[in-house]
Image (cartoon, rainbow, N blue to C red):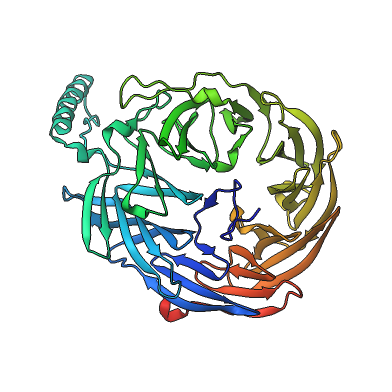
Amino acid sequence: MTSATGTNLSVAGVDEADFVKTDGNHFFLVNYEYLSVFTLRDHQPPEHTTLIKLSTANESLAYSELLIASDRALWFRSIRGGFVDEDGDKVDWTTEINELDLSNPAAPRVLRTLTLLHMGYLGAHLVDGQVRVVLSDVKEPALAYPRTHGASASEIEENVEDTEKENNRIIRRAGLNAWHPTYELLDHRTDERSTGFVVPCSRTYLPTTSDRGQSGIYMITFDTSTGLEHWDAVSLLDDVSAVYATTESVYVASRTARRSDSQIHHFTVDDRVGLTYSGSVAVPGQINDAKSLDEYNKHLWVWYTQRDGRETKSRMLIIAPDAWSASFNSPGSGGEGAARPERHVLAADVVMFAGALVYVSDINSDGVHVAVLDRREPNKFANVGELDLPSSTWYIHPLEENKALIVGRECEWIDTCSDIMIGQIGTIEPSSVAVSGSVSVFGTSLRVLDDDRAFLFSNDVAWVLAYEGNKYSAYGIKVVGESVTIDATLPVGQFTSRAIVVGRTLYLIAQTGKIYTHDLDNYMNLGEVTLGDQEQ
C-alpha cells in the first residue's frame, strides 16, 4: 500500500513522516540540515531546483523527517546539544519543528520554528491535514544520591536520610520549569518570539499502569491550515517504546522499569473535542515495535512476548474499545482499562496483520513455520491453515484480502542462509494455506534492507531493495495470479533506501540526496541526479 506522498503506510489514510516526500510534481528531501526540492521531468532524472540550509552550529543532528500537506511542509529535526535552557543548564536533546510555505516549490520559505527543549522526537503522522507529533522528555531537576560505597549499615541509613532531606529542599526550590519542558516559537516573518510550557499541568497524567514518574510521553497536534500558531498537547509520566497511529487514535506503548512488562496508552483525536487521553492498559510482557499493534473492528490487537528464563512465549492480547474507559478524580491522576482482554498463546518471530487475517511465522531448526489466523470474531482466532518454509522470514506483505508476499532467506540450516526467497502465500479456502508461487534471488551474502518503508508494491510489482557487500540493487518481483517472477534487477551505485513510483517512472532514492531514475515500461536507466559534493 502506497501513500499519496510516496512512502509506505502502516494504516490507510495515515501518512508517516519520512526523509523524502512527493506531491507528484516534486520530490522534497531532508538530509539533516538541508531541505532539497527536485522537480520531476518527463523521461529524465529530476532537476535539483532549490536548497534550504538551517543552522547547525554547535549542534549534532540525530534525525530529520518531513511531512507535506497541500502548500505546507513540516520538517522535524532531532538535535543533540547546542542549546541552554532558561536556568542556564545545557540541554541534551531538543526537537525542532519547522513550518515551511511550499506555495512556490522553487522558493520555499520557513514561516515558523517551534523549538522544544529537553524533548526527543519519536515520530509524526498526518491525517486529513492534522499533524500528530509524539515526543519524550528528559526534563528533571538534578537530585542527590546517597553515598553507600564503603559505608556501614548505620552510615548508609544516615546518608539516605540526609539525601532525602536534600532532595526535598531541591524540589521545593525548583520551579515548574525544572519538571516541565518549555518551548520557543519564532515567527520568521515578524521576528516575534513567544515562550511557555509545552503542556499545562492540568493536561499531565500519571497512568495507574505506570511505575515511572520522571520521564514523560508528550503528544502535540495541530492543523496544517493554521500551522504552528495553535496546537493542542497532552502528556503522561511514562517512557515510550512504540507508537502506532490510526485515523482516529494514537496508541503509545511503554515498558516498566523492569522491562519485563508494558503499558499501552490510548489517545483519541476528534475535531470537536480535540486531543484526549482515554486511558491505559497493562500488558504482561514486552511489545517489540509498532508492527506489534493493529486496530481491527475497533479492537486493538497486541502481539507481545514473555520470557521465563531461556523460554520465550508469544501471546496476542485483544483490547476491547471499552477497556480504555478512564475516570479522573483530579488533573494528574490517570485511569486504567476496565475490561480484562482475552489472551491467546502463539509462538511467533514475525507477525503481520492483514485485514481479517493475521500471519505469524516462527523460526525453528528446520526453517519457518507459518500460521494464518482469521480474526473476524473479536475474541477468538480461527486457524485458516499452516505451512512450513525452508527459510527465515524477514517480513510478510499483504497483497490483497486473501494473499500475502513473504520475503526471507533460503536455508538448508538456519545458520547457512544465503539467497533471498520471495513467495506468495494463498489463503483462499480455509485450511488450504500454500505457497502458490516463489522465486529466489541468488547471492552468497545477500541482505534485504530491514527498513519496512524500503519495500514497495506497485502495479503488481514488489520492489525489494537489497545489497551484497558494497553492491546495491533493486529487485522487481512481478506477482500476477499465482505466478511470481523476477521482472527486473536494477543495480545502483550507493545505498538506496526508498523506491517511489510516479506515473510510469521508478525512482530509487538515497538519503544522501542521490536519485536513480528508471522507465517502468522497459526498465531503461534514465540517469541520476545528486545534490553535489559541495552541497552535502
Using the rendered view, name the quadrant where residue 449 is placed: bottom right
Residue 493 seen in render? no
Q: Residue furthest front?
A: 272
In this rendering, is residue 22 above or below 281?
A: below
- Point out the image quarter for the C terminus: bottom left
Q: Is residue 294 left or right of residue 33?
A: right
198 vs 188, nearest the viewer: 188
Q: Is residue 478 left or right of residue 30?
A: right
How many marks overall? 0
483 vs 413, nearest the viewer: 483
In this rendering, is residue 316 above or below 354?
A: above
In this rendering, is residue 443 above or below 239?
A: below
Q: Is residue 117 left or right of residue 506?
A: left
Q: Position of residue 365 (x, y in %)?
A: 75, 40
Q: Position of residue 534 (x, y in %)?
A: 42, 81
Q: Is residue 424 left or right of residue 111?
A: right
Rendered residue at 23%/33% (across/down):
145
308 vs 117, nearest the viewer: 117
Rendered residue at 49%/50% (across/down):
126
Rendered residue at 36%/42% (across/down):
232
Q: Position of residue 265 (x, y in %)?
A: 46, 32
Residue 205 seen in render? yes
Rendered residue at 63%/29% (across/down):
316
Q: Position of residue 381 (x, y in %)?
A: 72, 27
